[in-house]
Amino acid sequence: MPQRDYYDILGVNESASESEIKKVYRNLAKKYHPDVNKGNEDAETRFKEISEAYNVLKDKEKRHKYDQMRKYGAFGGGGSGGFDFGQFRKQGAPGTHHGGGGSFSFEDLFGFGGLGDVFGGIFDRGDRIRRERTGRKQKGDSFQSEITIPFDLAVKGGKQVINLTFQEPCDSCSGTGSERGTHPKTCPDCHGRGTISIAQGFFAVNRTCPRCLGRGTIIEKPCSVCRGSGEVKTSKKLSVTIPVGVSDGARLRLKGQGVSGIKGGPRGDIVLTLHISPHRFFNRKGNDIYCTIPLDIMKAIKGTKIRVKTIFDKKVDIKVPAGTRDGKVFRLKGFGVRSKTETGDQYVTIKLNKPSNLSEEDLKIIEEFENNGEV
């Protein structure tokens, strides 16, 4: 029989938002969960359908590809009755899809090769699943995240406490997705291979099996902890050492802090991309620091001395010569960011202000200065 449409399974419109789909899924999952319907095979089957539909529709990329296939009737929606995948299975060899009097190809279905691997794109659960099937110890995946750190911390270095949340293999079922004491059965479609072979003329192309999602097995009784996904959400609180003078976009690797391994293998790493929050006074370009200092125009005309803040909490005096113009830049050598490779400078730009309570004499002096550059 044709593959049921995922939108029909969840009872949502094809234009439903992510939040609507999530809300409907939660309500249905609670209603049909095996723990609530012990011994009810129909409820268990319904729960599997709901979970499969949600796993595709909650993901933007998977949903986009699914919608494209659906337009052509691949799932009984949007086309003229839908494809009968069961018919393809009957006519071909085990794990191979053939159609009618010739070969069946998803490339032919779409008319271009870019979506030829659409089943792999929709149903592939990633390298973790394929590695899990080998039965050998495997290092866990690396987890990548982005964090924002304060400007001062990036300049001086130090410690930053972060909270991360990611998915990793479920301890209760060891990542199999099956309830303790039960075991997945071999997938009848791919016969345990995790892939099906789609005939294309004299050739055959392997695709991830859409029924078992590449596992090679079917979960009959989902794990009560991870609900059959084989993964659970993990939260970590870590203290990260930020190097002195780190730049925006820099990456830090925390070895052995990532996703737990498969079959007792070591944990992967955490890779952090750093972003630096802006400072209210300083701007940074490379290792150089820039700031702007407001100055009374009369002081600039007569000459003065100003005290400037630096990134190292040390103030430096700058002599402003008489007749200094608006936009004048002073360089403080060696007062920029100090990284492993070099030390930058600090550049101070003068921004002249004209007070409102000036005398007639002062106004004449300013006018002469602005017109001729001298008093």
Image: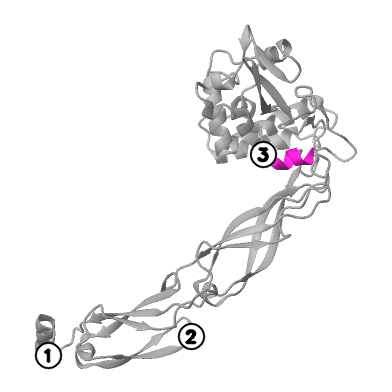
Question: What residue type is disc 3 on?
Answer: Arg
Task: From this view, report whether residue 351 is shown above or below residue 260.
Answer: below
Please say whether residue 13 is visible from this viewpoint: no
As drawn, is 362 to the left or to the right of 19?
left
Q: Where residue 26 is drawn, which disc sits there?
A: 3
Q: Of helix, strand and loop, which mostly describes the magenta segment?
A: helix
For residue 109, the mark is none
Query: What residue is disc 2 on?
Result: 313
How many other residues sit within 10 Å of disc 1, few (<14), some (14-19) or many (≥20)? Answer: some
Q: Earlier in the sequence, mark 1 or mark 2?
A: 2
Query: Image quadrant for the N terminus?
Result: top right
Start and end of the magenta stretch?
126-133
Q: Residue at x 44, y 77 (%)?
A: 344
Q: What residue type is labelled 1?
A: Val
The residue identified by callout 1 is 375
Query: For the C terminus, which image quadrant?
Result: bottom left
